[in-house]
Amino acid sequence: MANGCNYLDSNIIISKADLKQINADGAHVNLQGYNALSKREKEVFPLVALGYSNKEISEKLFISTKTVEAHKANITRKLHLHNHVELVRYAVHHHLIDF
């Protein structure tokens, strides 16, 4: 923690306000369906949640940026997620990313 912000990764900063929104009571998050993700989608998911760009993910996993985009679309569709906050919230609840 530095300057009142938690660091998840060297590429992303989460503020106290972000954490409050992620952990908000009553927020609807579909926690079903993770098992429906493919092995590669499960590898892509935490990197997306941590804020890596499509290019960075493609370089880390040795796949094209178009493939990363397809995996991201599949993840959000399968898990019924609508924005990045919901994606991060899901990742936090499933311990896919650490604080």
Image (cartoon, rainbow, N blue to C red):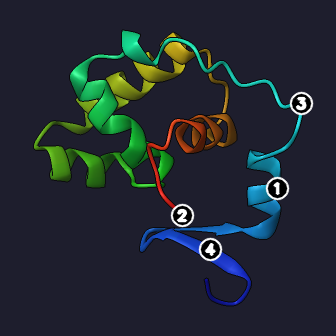
> Which residue is tagged 3?
26
Above or below, comparing residue 22 to residue 34 in the picture = below
Write the residue at 82% across / 56% down: 20
> Which residue is tagged 1?
20
- Say the numbered circle drawn on residue 79: none
Residue 48 lies left or right of residue 20; in this view the side is: left
> Which residue is tagged 2?
99
Is disc 2 surrounded by few (<14), some (14 to 19) or many (20+) residues within 10 Å? few
Residue 11 lies left or right of residue 93; in this view the side is: left
Q: CA distance from mark 1 to mark 3?
A: 12 Å
Is disc 1 surrounded by few (<14), some (14 to 19) or many (20+) residues within 10 Å? few
What secondary structure is marked by label 4? strand
Q: CA distance from mark 3 to mark 4?
A: 23 Å
Q: Are marks 1 and 3 in contact (CB under 8 Å)?
A: no
Above or below, comparing residue 67 to residue 12 in the picture = above
* Amino acid residing under circle 2: Phe
Q: CA distance from mark 2 to mark 3?
A: 22 Å
Residue placed most toward the observer, 17 or 66 = 17
* Amino acid residing under circle 1: Lys
Q: Are marks 2 and 4 in contact (CB under 8 Å)?
A: yes
Residue 26 lies left or right of residue 55; in this view the side is: right
Say whether disc 2 or disc 3 marks the residue closer to the N-terminus: 3
Classify the position of the C terminus by image quarter: bottom right
Say whether disc 1 or disc 3 marks the residue closer to the N-terminus: 1
In the figure, residue 61 lies in which quadrant? Answer: top left
In the figure, residue 67 lies in which quadrant? Answer: top left
Name the spot of residue 44 as percent of width and height, x first: 32, 37
Name the spot of residue 30 as percent of width and height, x first: 66, 18
> Which residue is tagged 4?
6
Name the spot of residue 42 as percent of width and height, x first: 32, 30
Badge count: 4
